[in-house]
């Protein structure tokens, strides 16, 4: 099998920078002639021979290497398709085994890391700094004292792994409590306003359903019937006050 290409390494060609254009042209032509006709027909002066000898030697080594590769491929082909299939199967098994071992090693390493991970409890200033970073209203001192007294274990007695996550839970709960308190304040204000209009405590409380309806709760059916007997103007006023406060125009009634 003939070889119709050759390799020139860029870092070796810096020698061209030291040649004149005529010498560089001669250099390239000699390389071409070597690959076309062989080494025996080359006529070189001493300077050119010194410059081009490393290249010619590399070309010779490349040809030998190429010949060996071709012979090896030829022998492999003569072994037959069955052997190729068998070798491919063995290769796949080796790859699969290596992948399995790598996976096992990764899992083992992960387990070791997980087991050896040691919780480092924060100091009070770190808790305060994180609260400032979060711009929340969590009482850092209260949070720190709570977990410090419990040796940094959660409600189930498990060791805390991430104190920042616990603080986020406190933040979320405080936010929910704040919303609930705000809703309670709105509810109380509404009830008082409606008592003034009806001159009676007909409505016990007001909530908002999941479908965003205002739910009017009555202690019993009698109070519900009293509300229905109010004149149209008062009923309309009650409806408008609730709608403006709770941002809904739909109502439900429970007693």
Image: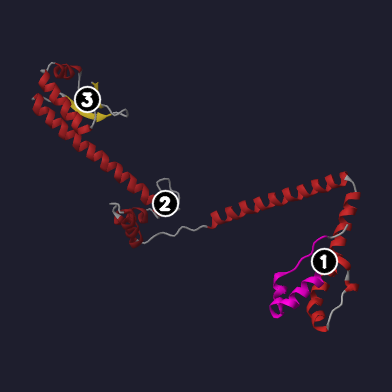
Q: In this rendering, would 121 be left or right of 93?
A: left
Q: In this rendering, would 197 be left or right of 50?
A: left
- Nearest to N terminus: mark 3 or mark 1: 1
Label 3: element kind? strand
**Span of residues in magenta:** 4-31
| Residue at mark 2 | 153
Residue at left 80%, top 71%?
A: 29
| Residue at mark 3 | 216
Between residues 193 and 110, which one lies in front from this camera angle?
193
Percent coordinates x, y for residue 73 in the rendering:
86, 54
| Residue at mark 1 | 62
- For the N terminus, the image quarter is bottom right
Q: In this rendering, would 186 be left or right of 210?
A: left
- Nearest to N terminus: mark 2 or mark 1: 1
Q: Nearer the viewer, mark 3 or mark 1?
A: 1
Q: How dense is the environment of label 2, judged by Cα within 10 Å: few (below 14), some, or many (20 and up)?
A: some
Above or below 75: residue 201: above
């Amino acid at each position: 099998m003939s070889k119709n290409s050759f390799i020139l390494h860029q870092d070796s060609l810096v020698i061209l920078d030291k040649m004149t254009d005529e010498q560089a042209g001669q250099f390239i032509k000699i390389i071409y002639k070597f690959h076309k006709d062989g080494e025996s027909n080359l006529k070189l002066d001493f300077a050119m021979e010194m410059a081009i000898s490393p290249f010619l030697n590399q070309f010779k080594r490349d040809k030998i290497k190429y010949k060996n590769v071709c012979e090896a491929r030829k022998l492999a082909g003569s072994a037959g398709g069955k052997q190729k299939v068998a070798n491919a199967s063995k290769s796949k098994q080796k790859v699969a085994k290596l992948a399995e071992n790598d996976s096992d090693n990764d899992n083992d390493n992960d387990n070791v890391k997980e087991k050896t991970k040691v919780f480092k409890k924060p100091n009070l200033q770190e808790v305060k700094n994180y609260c400032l970073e979060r711009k929340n209203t969590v009482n850092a001192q209260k949070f720190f004292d709570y977990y410090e007294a419990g040796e940094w274990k959660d409600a189930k007695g498990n060791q805390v792994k991430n104190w920042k996550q616990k603080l986020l839970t406190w933040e979320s709960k405080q936010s929910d409590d704040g919303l609930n308190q705000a809703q309670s304040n709105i509810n109380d204000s509404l009830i008082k306003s409606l008592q003034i209009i009806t001159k009676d405590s007909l409505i016990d409380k007001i909530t908002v359903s999941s479908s965003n309806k205002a739910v009017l709760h009555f202690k019993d059916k009698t109070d519900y019937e009293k509300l229905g007997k109010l004149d149209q103007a008062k009923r309309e006023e009650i409806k408008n006050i609730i709608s403006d406060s709770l941002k809904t125009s739909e109502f439900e009634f429970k007693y």
